[in-house]
Image: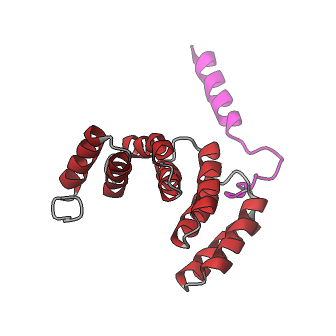
Amino acid sequence: MMLVACTLILVAATSTLPSGAPPQAPGPRYPSEEALRRYAQGRLLEEQGQRDLAIGEYARALVLDDGAGTLARRMSEASAVSGEASRSLEFAVRALAIDSADARASWLKGTALLNLGRGRDALPPLEAAATLDSERVEYARTLGRAAESIDRLDLALRSFRRAVWLEPDDAESW
């Protein structure tokens, strides 16, 4: 019994001894520090009202890190604010290719399609956005507008009802 206890203590003690190899430093959190810097620069430029320059920085960051759905989504948002629906659609589709469960990218895709006069095509991504994030009033409101534009009054009614429930003081939804 004593021999078994001593063996267990010896095994436990030697298994926690450090090896001769130096400790490994944690790897970078981002695949490209340059992409992160470009993204931060783009955000700064966007805050300063220089949206075109910001989009350029986002594009450079996306080239460096083509798997960053947040970058593609940010480019879609910035393009939408600039009134470039086609470009917004392009980057929303790209963001969804990276993360198909991105509610914001679905909403951006649907909104871009709606702004391009493609109401029927806008419904599926808008419905997906409203399902993925049922707490965002703008998703419900936009879905209602899209449904109304193509005479889907049942869906419009449900969507506007949801928007009113989410923000009862919002006169636009009433």
Q: Residue drawn at (70%, 55%), measured in percent from left and top?
A: 26
Location of residue 133 in the rendering, given as x and y in whole percent from the top left corner = 38, 47
Residue 90's spot in the image, x, y percent? Answer: 64, 55
Q: Work out which residue is located at the far top of the displayed protein and give it.
A: 1
In this rendering, position of residue 173 left or right of residue 113: left
Q: Is residue 145 visible?
A: yes
Query: Does residue 28 sit above or below 150 in this rendering?
Result: below
The residue located at (37%, 54%) in the rendering is 142
Question: Within the image, what quadrant is residue 60 found in?
Answer: bottom right
Q: Which residue lies at the image location 33% right of the left edge and 46% below the top edge? A: 134
Q: Position of residue 96 (x, y in %)?
A: 59, 46
Find out whether residue 26 is within the magenta segment. yes
Q: What range is drawn magenta here? A: 1-30
Is 59 within the magenta? no
Left or right: where 9 falls relative to 35:
left
For the residue pair 98 and 52, the one nearer the viewer reads as 52
Nearest the camera: 164 or 69?
A: 164
- Residue 121 or residue 165, whichever sits in front: 121
Q: Position of residue 108 (x, y in %)?
A: 50, 55
Q: Nearer the viewer, residue 73 or 81?
A: 81
At 51% across and 41% down in the image, what residue appears? 101
Name the image quarter holding residue 54.
bottom right
38 is higher (above) or lower (below) than 93: below
